[in-house]
């Protein structure tokens, strides 16, 4: 079983994966955690160069099919090298980002009416042609891009070409919500009814509730 935590940059994916790992361990589940892109591995080098601006200083400088392929190479190499065997044996896999990130980020480079065709190409390419597993559950951490900019402000010069582009992050959120509606991702709103950012634990509890529905 494969569970993916998705969201635009700064939405709290790494934090929520860490909370999820602690909770799964405490509850006695055997699992394997993934985190993409894998900058330190050979398969992740094209993605790293792209995000550092080696192929263009703005996200739109590289067309979405080419940019997507950089991240696809990282995922398939990860699968073949590290976790295909345990996945096929039935081990629970939890991942920070996956193919769904290509839908979120590179789908944003298209107008809304053209995104569905891109999504279809992307999922056919990775799940059918490359042979990557389809997620059993995708959880989208949804947060407005203006709130994300405030959260990312502390990264300063450490931001990549995605994180530096405010308009791009707004379009990424739109693309993610469009994909979520089409493919049944679970949306978890990071802003509460009072207009304030929800606590990390509050968000975690909602995520874990959805996960327990399919693993128990």
Image (cartoon, rainbow, N blue to C red):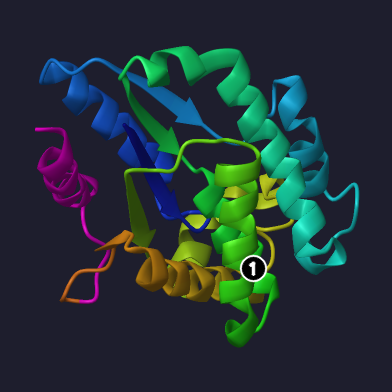
Residue 72: image quadrant is: top right
| Mark 1, other Cα within 10 Å: few <14 / some 14–19 / many ≥20 | some
- Quarter of the image with the N terminus in it: top left
Residue 192: image quadrant is: bottom left
What stretch of residues is rendered in magenta?
195-216
From the viewer's perspective, tell me whether residue 203 is left or right of residue 170.
left
Please give the name of the residue rendered at 90% of the width and 47% of the height, measured from the top-left corner. Answer: 54
From the viewer's perspective, tell me whether residue 113 is left or right of residue 57.
left
Question: Residue 121: where, in percent of width, then height?
Answer: 64, 61
Q: Nearer the viewer, residue 24 or 116?
A: 116
Res 38 seen here: no
Residue at the limit of the structure toward the right, as seen here: 55
Please give the name of the residue rendered at 24% of the width and 15% of the height, measured from the top-left corner. Answer: 30
Q: Nearer the viewer, residue 135 or 173?
A: 135
Q: Is residue 194 above or below residue 118?
A: below
Q: Dominant secondary structure of the magenta stretch? A: helix
Question: Residue 103: where, in percent of width, then height?
Answer: 57, 60
Secondary structure of the residue carrying numbered label 1: helix
Please give the name of the residue rendered at 77% of the width and 21% of the height, measured from the top-left corner. Answer: 42
Q: Nearer the viewer, residue 87 or 145?
A: 87
Q: Is residue 120 above or below residue 161?
A: below
- The residue pinned by badge 1 equals 118
- Quarter of the image with the C terminus in it: top left
Res 211 seen here: yes
Question: Residue 12: where, in percent of width, then height?
Answer: 39, 48
Please give the name of the residue rendered at 16% of the width and 48% of the height, measured from the top-left corner. Answer: 210
Residue 59: image quadrant is: bottom right
Does 119 appear in magenta?
A: no
Question: Residue 117: where, in percent of width, then height?
Answer: 62, 73
């Amino acid at each position: 079983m494969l569970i993916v935590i998705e969201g635009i940059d700064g939405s709290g994916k790494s934090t929520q994966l860490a909370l999820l790992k602690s909770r799964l361990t405490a509850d006695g589940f055997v699992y394997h955690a993934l985190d993409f892109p894998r900058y330190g591995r050979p398969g992740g080098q094209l993605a790293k160069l792209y995000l550092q601006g080696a192929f263009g200083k703005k996200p739109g400088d590289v067309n979405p099919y080419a940019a997507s392929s950089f991240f696809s190479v990282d995922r398939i190499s990860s699968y073949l090298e590290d976790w295909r065997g345990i996945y096929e044996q039935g081990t629970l896999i939890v991942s920070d980002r996956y193919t769904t990130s290509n839908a979120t980020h590179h789908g944003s480079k298209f107008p809304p009416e053209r995104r569905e065709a891109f999504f279809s190409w992307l999922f056919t390419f990775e799940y059918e042609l490359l042979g990557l597993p389809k997620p059993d559950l995708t959880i989208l951490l949804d947060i407005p891009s203006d709130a994300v900019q405030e959260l990312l402000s502390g990264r300063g010069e450490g931001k990549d070409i995605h994180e530096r582009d405010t308009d791009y992050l707004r379009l990424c959120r739109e693309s993610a919500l469009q994909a979520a509606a089409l493919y049944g991702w679970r949306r978890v709103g990071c802003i509460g009814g009072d207009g304030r950012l929800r606590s990390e634990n509050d968000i975690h509890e909602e995520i874990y509730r959805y996960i327990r529905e399919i693993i128990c």
